[in-house]
Image: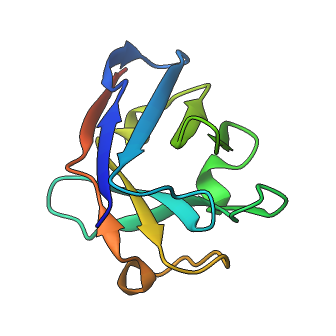
Amino acid sequence: QVQLVESGGGLVQAGGSLRLSCAASGRTVSSYAMGWFRQAPGKEREFVAAISWSAISRDYVNSVKDRFTISRDNAKNTLYLQMNSLKPEDTAVYYCAARLVRIMSRSTSDYDYWGQGTQVTVSS
């Protein structure tokens, strides 16, 4: 079993920055691909970014490219999402997820473990 706990969310003005963290426990996630997803009120959960087990490969949804950076520290069993130039449309609950393979995916159904989420609110 893997437990994932997100932190770092909050209220920020448009143009500001936040850094989300996702701490894993229970077993090491260094061999797993991981991802960030978000869900706004009334909308489906959507892919934001993913990273391979080695961090060599990264993938982003077009709307966050050049603004968000996904990274991981396998020694600390932690995943990060640096969010810059935030926009009101980035407002959502952000979830981290891990899948029991090394290859990234954009599909929620491909992930085996999920955190409880952290709220990000961007005011205009």
Q: Quadrant for the N terminus, please.
A: bottom left
The number of discs equals 0
The furthest residue to the left: 42
Q: Residue 62, how many percent across, how many down?
A: 66, 60
Q: Quadrant of residue 113?
A: bottom left
Coordinates of residue 83 in the picture (x, y in percent):
57, 31
- In the image, residue 44 above or below residue 15: below
Q: Residue at x 69, y 63 (%)?
A: 53
Q: Which residue is depicted at the point 49% across and 78% down?
A: 100
The quadrant in which the C terminus is found is: top left
Q: Is residue 117 left or right of residue 99?
A: left
Q: How is this picture coloured?
A: rainbow
User: How far from the left and from the top, in percent, is residue 35?
Assistant: 52, 60
Q: Nearer the viewer, residue 100 or 116?
A: 100
What x and y, as percent, mark residue 94?
34, 46
Q: Is residue 119 left or right of residue 82?
A: left
Closer to us: 110 or 60 = 110
Residue at 39 percent across and 33 percent down: it is 88
Left or right: 106, with 113 as reference point: right
Residue 119 or 85: which is nearer the viewer? Answer: 119
The image quarter in which residue 50 lies: bottom right
